Structures are given as structure tokens and as C-alpha cells.
Amino acid sequence: MKQFRLPQVDMPALALPAAVRAELEAVEARLAHRPKLQRLFSNCYPNTLSTTVKRMDDGTTFVITGDIPAMWLRDSVEQVIHYVPLAKEDAELRGLIGGLISRHARCIRTDPYANAFNERASGWHWSAGDRTEMSPWVWERKFELDSICFSMKLAYAYWKETGRADIFDAEFKEAMTTALSLWRTEQRHAAQSPYRFERDNGIEADTLVCGGLGSPVNDTGMVWSGFRPSDDACDFHYNVPSNMFLVVTLRRMREIAEFVYRDLGFERELARLEREVDRGIRLYGIYRHPEFGRIYAYETDGYGNYALLDDAGTPGLMSIPYIGYADASDPIYANTRRFALSTANSYYYEGAAAQGIGSPHTPPGYIWPIALAMQGLTSADAAEKLRMLALLEATDADTGFMHEGFHMDDPSQYTRDWFAWSNSLFAQLVLEAMKAGLLDA
């Protein structure tokens, strides 16, 4: 199977906006008594802007993931989301974030099924022989339900933090209607969907069975997804955390439709889909576990089959409060969290160096810093937040940055030197801990 050599993308140096510089200096001063943590934050907090952001001539913003020169919708949002609270008072930062929102809207209109895009219509693809309808703008066309949800998350957060609705133009409205049409189609995937995806590289998780259609599912009201947030194929194609994220996304889109576009008919269509997906989660997405009680399943096919696991990627079961579907005090979430942080979860690892959640996307025994940061961000326990920070501080292999995954017994064995999403989520946890007064001297 031929693959393109990873192309080089020219990433000009980008000076940090004034608000970001000020925040960085303020946190560095407050962390002077924690030199290792200070160094990590100083490296990780600006990493997205310093190394992965490119202003385009058309006013949009392109954000690569790090060591892969393409823009994932999901990753690029999580790479910049910790800067959004600073955008209200910083015009330069608003321009960068607003430009990324515009770029996302264009990507969605280009191909709502794609998960990752090129800087230009170069025809570069992750794999040269994928059997699907590729565009020269598309780097990879794995349909992941969460992708567009992240695009809408960024637009909504920008609007709420800055009070500005300038991003909500006709092109963004078209992206919203494109997304709704896509989700309606994928509620009945087998009967309605044109989407197929096959890749012959010998990796089972990189392709869909049944001629690219995926394994059979029952109609549940939830929306079908080909792939997980990890970019691995779903076992059962109703990914429950992604459908939860969709419910939250539809609520946000309803607000935009009503108060920005004044389109009450569109708002009602979004509300109807929200009710159907949420009902599907409640009817089909909850499993009665003999040890943990009622828990949310990771995936189901609607026929009574479940994938009982949690994956390090967001959205996952651990991140349910983070994505806004349920509060950390929700009893089903509490049961689910206990399950996810136990060896009943086949991707939870306990080693000499750390304990945490990994992913089938990386080798067995590899824990993801993203999962440790998410465990801290979703915890109501100050001691657990501090414990996650200490673990992250101790497992960077003295590189000064976060990675994709590291071996549970030896953090010097890790994947991806340059993974901006992981750096950004770590920075979010530091900022939250500081806001709660947990890191004061």
C-alpha cells in the first residue's frame, strides 16, 4: 500500500499576541516555587501559537497538529481553546481564532465527512489509495462524528467569551445546515448514506468492513460514526460519547440559530434532532454492569452489543463533564468513571511509573497524557487534580513537553515528540488548578 511521504508545510514564526504573553508571564511568576512545572507550562502553553498556527492570505487560520502537516478539526480546536478566554481584550488573538472558525466552516462545506484537511488543494492524503470520495483539500476522510462538534464548540465559545457575532456569516450558516443534513443522513446510515471508506494497509482499525459500509446497526435515533476520536474504526458504530457531544452541540447551535440568525424554523429542526439523539443515548447507550451498576457504554450497535471501554481521546467517557453532557455528580457518570479507571477497562494501565488510560491507537501499556489531564479536569477532588499534575510533571521524559503516549513503566519510551493538543490540555489543567488556588506557594 503506497503512502505519500509526509509533505513539509512552511510555518512562519508567529509572535505571541499580547494577552497570551501577559498570561504566560503571570503564570510563570506564580509558579516560581515549582520550577519543573513552570518550565512545562512555559513550553506547553504557547506551543500551539509558536509552532502550529499559520495566517493565510485570505484571512483564515490554518493549524497543524504538530508533527503531521494537516489540520484536524478536533485537534485544532483543542489546541487553541485555552486561548479563547483572552480573546475579548486582544484583537490579534480574536483575528487568529476567528480565522480558524472561518477555515473550519469552509472545510465543513467542502466535505462534511472528512476529519483532516490540507492547507491548500494540494491532493496530499494520509494514504494514497483510500477507497472513498476524496477531494484535493482533504488529508483524510475518516468520518468521525465528533469533528464538526468541535468546530461548533469553538465558534460558540468565541461568541460567548467575546460577545461578538461577526463570525456568524452566510458561510457559517451554510456550514451549520450542511452539518444538520449530514447528521440526519447518518441517523439511518445503511439506508441513506453515500459514505464508504476502505484502506488496504493491513491495519484492521484503519478500514470499515462490509465493503466500506461498516458493520450493521439498528436505527436508534443516535447518529452513526465510522471512526472514533482516536481515528480508529468503531466496533459498533454508535459512539456514545460522540453522540453526547452532539446533543450538547445541537443545544449550542439552537442558540445561535435563534439569537444570531433569528431562524426559528432551523432552531426547531435542531431541537428535534437533539431530542432524538438524547433519547437514543438513554435507551441504548446505558449498560447494567454487574460490578459498577448502570454505566454509559463506549459504543453500541443498537442490537444489544456493547463496547465496554474508555479511550484516551476526547470525547470519551471520562470527558463527559468536560464536553458538557452531564455533571460530574451524575450517578451514572460516577459509576462510569469508576469503571474507566479500573482494570475492567481494557485500556486502563497500571505500571511502575503511572496509572491511566491509553488507547488502541498506541501500543499496549502506553498511557496518554491527554487522559491524565482529562482525569484532572473532570475531577471534583482537589487531591486528584494535584495528583494528575504531579504525574504529568514526572512523565515528560525531561523533554519539557507532553507526548501522545508513554510506557507505563518507562516514560522515556513515548510516541510523538510534537503533539500540540496534549500540550494545550496540560496547560488547561494548570490554569484550572491555579484558578482554584491549588498551586499557590
Image (cartoon, rainbow, N blue to C red):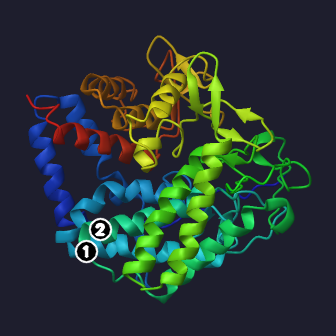
Residue 201 shown left or right of residue 154 in the figure: right
Residue lying at 68% horizontally and 70% vertically, measured from the top left: 182
Inspect the image, locate mark 1, and give the three-letter code of the amino acid beneath it.
Gly
**Kind of element beneath mark 1:** loop
Inspect the image, locate mark 2, and give the three-letter code of the amino acid beneath it.
Lys
| Percent x, y of residue 390 | 30, 24
Q: Residue 163, which numbered label?
A: 1
Residue lying at 91% horizontally and 51% vertically, measured from the top left: 210
As drawn, the residue found furthest toward the right would be 211
Residue 67 in the image: above or below residue 406: below
Q: How many labels sit on residues?
A: 2
Q: Within 10 Å of the Cα at label 1, are there few (<14), some (14-19), or many (20+) other Cα atoms?
A: few
Give the camera-side residue of 425 and 202: 425
Q: Within 10 Å of the Cα at label 2, are there few (<14), some (14-19), or many (20+) other Cα atoms?
A: some
As drawn, the residue found furthest toward the bottom would be 170
Give the camera-side residue of 4 and 31: 31
Give the camera-side residue of 6 and 322: 322
Task: Say if residue 433 shows up in the picture.
Answer: yes
Residue lying at 16% horizontally and 29% vertically, measured from the top left: 34
| Residue topped by disc 2 | 160
Residue 121 in the image: above or below residue 441: below
Residue 401 in the image: above or below residue 138: above
Task: Say if residue 120 shows up in the picture.
Answer: no
| Percent x, y of residue 129 | 83, 60
Residue lying at 29% horizontally and 48% vertically, measured from the top left: 45
**Kind of element beneath mark 2:** helix
Quadrant housing residue 430: top left
Residue 178 shown left or right of residue 259 in the figure: right
| Percent x, y of residue 89 | 16, 70
CB contact under 8 Å: marks 2 and 1: yes
Query: Which of the image's four quarters has the C terminus?
Result: top left
